[in-house]
């Protein structure tokens, strides 16, 4: 076969020589022979892909250097055709002869490189994992079907503004026009903000069109835009007009989809047919409100229940019947168990909640969830009865979940039966030998919990011997509440896995309560790895106890917005003497002025492992920059990021050389105030 290829190449060489002798193309540099060969073969493969014809087997016998070069020239659809028609079951089984070094090697790596290049060409701003062993072809077609990426700042923007002004209409009114407005607002935000990378994909375009009140047809017949068709290289192929239909893309590439996010209009029986080849592992559904949506969703769940491991609901209205039907669809055939590992219901509402029992299907789901390790019910207007019944069921079945998130609900009083003052006996309620042995993370922030709730929580925590992360932020527990928690913290080192992270942000603590807590934490045999006391008005007097906790092996400390002031930073700077183990610290919004820079200088000299420092909005004068840069030069640490935004600096061009030398992996270490924010100093006064 090689002789045939070489003979054909020799013929092309002679033909090119004749063209050169005739003087054709002298005004313009003639293309190389290799380029002509690659162009010819490319056209043939593209034609085969367009007409759904077979690829000529001779193409696979090309020398490696030609074959690999061909791969870099093919559009996605043609590359897919070439790889699909490979005359071997596995590309790794095929070794291409006639390599430059005379050795044979597999071509699978060449295909991967080509797919990775196409992915970055189409979505240059998309985040790519650093791992090399990835199926780039699968990632490409998965992204082609559906993918969105938002920066964290835009997510915050969307939640604050869109959620407040539009979500109310979408959730409680029955008109699709409000949902359509919501989608249009997202589109305008995507196009107007450089922080958002809106990735055009088939299912997202289809959802936008299907949401239009005027839409009345089959989802599979929705036309894919020319922009998407151009990207995959099937533009203008009149032989197969089905290329422009959503149904074609789902049928051809649906088996590559493992993670999808579906609007309610796509939760219909037709979608199950379109995605019948898919093996979904993760599914996010939005705006489920009506029975027809639930029926379509249940069919899709049944279709993928063997592979599905993650299921999330957002902006949904779920009745007891809906919940039971959905949970029942997850059970594997001939068993009473399911394979869901992560289950979330966020920013939704439960309808017709029974005050004495949970939906039967949901109870069965929790009881049979041997694989369930994460349960998140965030911002769902849950009351204390729901939370108590949920906790009782999890405890009764000795659930193996490791993450329980009940944040931003209204569950104050949910553990009142466990209060030491209750007439009921605590051990009998918890049950003998029953516990949540696997629970590692408990998030109950934003639930209006008070002192009595913390006292009850202390008894409940006994059933969580391996708890590592506790978040009770945004609850007005005050000093009395923290005093109830301290005995549990002191006893923590005696358990199998002592508490490692504690979050007490915005809990209305005073200096007195925080001091007592910090003193207790500083004396632990196994100190915390992470602590957050942010947004509590503690004042400068807390500097002394902070020195003690910083002197332990703590890695992450958040004391932003606690009112340290210049005096507090001065005390911290004077008191720190020994080497620190800190990796990440947040001291923002403390109005420290120039003393903040002095503290930073001392911190960088004593914390060789520090990676990130947030010192934003501290009213530092411009001369602080000189002190900080000098400290950076002397430090031998591994600092990657120092946030200095929000300070009122009249930044001069000559400061550029001062900060230019400080980089980590090509990125600046110093995050300086932007010119747009120079005249807008931060004000943390209420």
Image: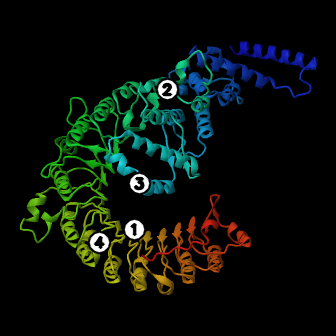
| Colouring convention used in this rendered image of the protein | rainbow
Residue 284 x/y as whole percent: 38, 41
Q: In front: mark 2 or mark 3?
A: 3
- Label at residue 165: 3
Task: Give the image quarter of residue 674.
Answer: bottom right
Between the residue at mark 3 and the residue at mark 4, the CA separation in whole angstroms equals 27 Å
Please tell me which residue lies in front, 593 or 127.
593
Which residue, given by chain and number where applicable, does mark 4 sit on?
Answer: 476
- Label at residue 250: none
Mark 2 or 3, nearer chain start: 3
Which residue, given by chain and number where applicable, does mark 1 sit on?
Answer: 530
- Residue at 44% in and 28% down: 255
Q: Which class describes the residues within 10 Å of circle 4: few (<14), some (14-19), or many (20+)? A: many
- Quarter holding the N terminus is top right
Q: Which class describes the residues within 10 Å of circle 3: few (<14), some (14-19), or many (20+)? A: few
Q: In front: mark 3 or mark 4?
A: 3
Q: In front: mark 1 or mark 2?
A: 2
Q: Which class describes the residues within 10 Å of circle 2: few (<14), some (14-19), or many (20+)? A: many
């Amino acid at each position: 076969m090689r002789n045939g290829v070489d003979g054909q190449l020799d013929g092309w060489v002679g033909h090119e020589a004749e063209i050169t002798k005739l003087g054709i193309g002298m005004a313009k540099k003639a293309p190389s022979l290799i380029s002509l060969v690659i162009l010819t073969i490319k056209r043939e493969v593209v034609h085969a892909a367009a007409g759904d014809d077979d690829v000529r087997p001779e193409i696979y016998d090309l020398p490696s250097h030609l074959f690999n070069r061909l791969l870099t020239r093919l559009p996605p659809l043609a590359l897919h055709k070439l790889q699909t028609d490979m005359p071997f079951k596995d590309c790794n089984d095929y070794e291409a002869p006639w390599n430059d070094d005379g050795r044979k090697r597999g071509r699978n790596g060449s295909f991967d490189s080509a797919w990775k290049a196409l992915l970055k060409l189409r979505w240059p701003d998309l985040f790519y994992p650093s791992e090399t062993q990835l199926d780039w072809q699968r990632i490409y077609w998965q992204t082609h079907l559906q993918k969105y990426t938002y920066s964290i700042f835009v997510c915050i923007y969307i939640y604050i503004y869109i959620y407040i002004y539009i979500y109310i209409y979408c959730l409680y009114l029955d008109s699709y026009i409000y949902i359509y407005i919501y989608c249009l607002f997202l589109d305008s935000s995507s196009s107007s903000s450089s922080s958002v990378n809106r990735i055009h994909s088939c299912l997202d375009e289809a959802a936008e069109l299907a949401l239009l009140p005027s839409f009345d047809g089959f989802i599979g017949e929705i036309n894919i835009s020319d922009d998407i068709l151009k990207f995959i290289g099937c533009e203008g192929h009149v032989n197969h007009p089905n290329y422009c239909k959503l149904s074609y893309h789902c049928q051809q590439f649906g088996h590559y989809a493992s993670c999808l996010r579906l609007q309610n209009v796509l939760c219909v029986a037709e979608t199950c047919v379109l995605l019948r080849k898919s093996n979904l592992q993760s599914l996010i559904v939005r705006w489920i409100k009506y029975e027809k949506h639930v029926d379509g969703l249940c069919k899709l769940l049944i279709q993928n229940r063997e592979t599905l491991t993650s299921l999330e609901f957002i902006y949904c209205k779920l009745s007891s019947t809906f919940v039971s039907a959905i949970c029942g669809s997850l059970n594997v055939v001939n068993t009473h168990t399911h394979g869901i590992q992560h289950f979330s219901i966020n920013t939704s509402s439960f309808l017709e909640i029974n005050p004495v029992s949970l939906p039967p299907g949901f109870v069965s789901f929790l009881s049979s969830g041997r694989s369930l390790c994460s349960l998140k019910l965030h911002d769902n207007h849950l009351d204390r009865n729901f939370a108590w019944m949920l906790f009782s069921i999890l405890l009764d079945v000795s659930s193996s979940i490791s993450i329980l998130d009940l944040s931003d609900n209204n569950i104050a009083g949910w553990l009142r039966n466990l209060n030491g003052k209750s007439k009921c006996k605590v051990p009998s309620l918890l049950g003998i030998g029953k516990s949540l042995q696997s629970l590692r993370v408990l998030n109950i922030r934003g639930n209006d919990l008070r002192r009595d709730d913390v006292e009850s929580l202390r008894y409940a925590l006994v059933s969580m011997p391996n708890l590592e992360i506790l978040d009770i932020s945004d609850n007005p527990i005050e000093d009395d509440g923290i005093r109830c928690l301290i005995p549990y913290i002191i006893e923590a080192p005696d358990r199998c896995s002592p508490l490692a992270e504690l979050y007490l942000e915005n809990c209305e603590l005073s200096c007195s309560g925080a001091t007592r807590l910090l003193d207790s934490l500083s004396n632990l045999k196994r100190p915390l790895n992470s602590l957050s006391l942010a947004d509590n008005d503690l004042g400068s007097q807390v500097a002394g106890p902070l020195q003690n906790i910083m002197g332990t092996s703590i890695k992450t400390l958040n004391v932003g917005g606690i009112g340290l002031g210049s005096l507090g930073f001065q005390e911290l700077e004077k008191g720190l003497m020994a080497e620190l183990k800190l990796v990440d610290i947040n001291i923002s919004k403390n109005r420290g002025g120039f003393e903040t820079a002095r503290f930073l200088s001392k911190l960088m000299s004593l914390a060789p492992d520090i990676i990130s420092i947030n010192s934003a909005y501290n009213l530092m004068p411009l001369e602080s920059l000189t002190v900080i840069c000098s400290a950076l030069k002397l430090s031998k640490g591994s600092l990657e990021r120092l946030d200095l935004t929000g300070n009122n600096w009249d930044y001069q061009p000559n400061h550029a050389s001062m900060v230019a030398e400080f980089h980590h992996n090509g990125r600046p270490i110093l995050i300086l105030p932007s010119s747009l924010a120079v005249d807008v100093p931060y004000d943390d006064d209420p």
